[in-house]
Amino acid sequence: APISASDLERLQVLGHGSGGTVYKVLHKPTSTPYALKQLHSPAADSSSDNNTLQSELDILRRTTGSPYVVHCHAIFEKPSGDVSVLMEYMDLGSLETLLKSQGPFSEEKLAPIARQVLEGLDYLHKTHKIVHRDIKPGNLLMNNKKEVKIADFGCSSDESCSSSVGTCAYMSPERFDPERYGGSHNGYACDIWSFGVTIMELYMGYFPLLPKGQRPDWASLMCAICFGEVPCLPEGASEDFRSFLECCMHKEASKRWTAAQLLTHPFVCKAPSEECKPNLFDKKRKRDDDGVERSERSQKSIKIEVC
Ligand code: ADP
């Protein structure tokens, strides 16, 4: 049955993002917790903000076919222009929060995380031709089943929103200097760079492109990303892990592996619950087909409610 906004009770604030505030809410009839993201309503005279919001909503409606993308259950649009998005509740929060509370992740913990994020990216890139543009620890959410899902499509169709220092830390070299590093890249590779930086940060415990403890400012970030060497993992990291990150973090976009290629890398293949067989490619394609079908079916279940 469709979920009605009047059946939801606000419990607590989960976080404040650039796009709005996220609340934990309870669906009273079923006692199910959800996350409700209240988006800032764009000013009536600002058409560009409204476009950004509408394309974020459009992406949310379309990307419901993957277990590796945070599921959107409903979108509530009020006549006032206020919009809120009802999502599945990810009870362990973001990988950024987990890094702060639990410290760095071991390779054994990172491999299944990396695999799930790559499945999500492969789905966005291949099935929907969507570049996320803001992959970072704060946008990867986890639940108590150790499922990891990609969240927050606020930047996916908007170039301009990556101007804040926090977000540009994960930006790829070709986004600063397309002529030098872009080549004939197709845009998807920027998510792979951000993914590589994210995985490295989760392992090292600090942002890997700057010296430990240095506060990121725009100039030093741009220098580190465009002119610095790609950082190396510390001693003790396995060869598989090193090679995996090298495949993600080529400065030149065209040399980076795709999400689908990275899914065949030994670092993620050896992760628990992955069956990495020679016919992986056929299997994956079958899963993609399923994904499309599911996505079309579940699209119908998203209710746009005017309340
Ligand atoms: P930002 O705009 O900062 O990238 P969001 O606005 O998407 O992030 O979310 C802000 C914070 O709220 C997240 O970092 C996360 O801790 C929390 N959050 C967002 N969505 C969910 C969810 N579905 N389940 C649980 N927590 C969430």
Image: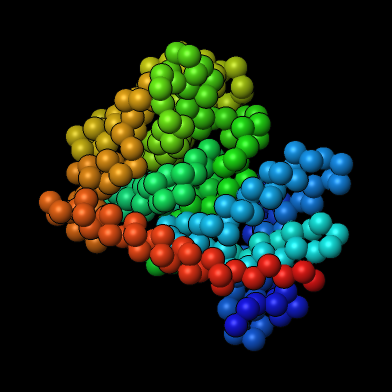
Vertical arrangement, residue 210 with respect to residue 152, above or below: above
Q: Is residue 109 visible?
A: no
State the residue in front, 148 or 133: 133
Q: Quadrant of the N terminus?
A: bottom right
Q: Residue at x 23, y 58 (%)?
A: 283
Vertical arrangement, residue 4 with respect to residue 294, above or below: below
Q: Residue at x 66, y 83 (%)?
A: 28
Give coordinates of residue 112: x percent, y percent.
Answer: 31, 53
Q: Quadrant of residue 168?
A: top right
Q: Residue at x 59, y 69 (%)?
A: 302
State the residue in front, 186 or 253: 186
User: Does residue 5 appear to the left or right of 261 in the view shown?
Assistant: right
Vertical arrangement, residue 157 with respect to residue 193, above or below: below
Q: Is residue 168 visible?
A: yes
Vertical arrangement, residue 261 with respect to residue 181, above or below: below
State the residue in front, 302 or 191: 302
Give coordinates of residue 273: x percent, y percent.
Answer: 24, 61
Name the colour scheme. rainbow
Give coordinates of residue 225: x percent, y percent.
Answer: 47, 21
Give coordinates of residue 5: x percent, y percent.
Answer: 72, 74
Residue that extends furthest to the bottom in the rendered view of this protein: 29
Residue that extends furthest to the left in the rendered view of this protein: 278
Q: Quadrant of the C terminus?
A: bottom right
Q: Residue at x 27, y 55 (%)?
A: 284
Q: How many marks?
A: 0
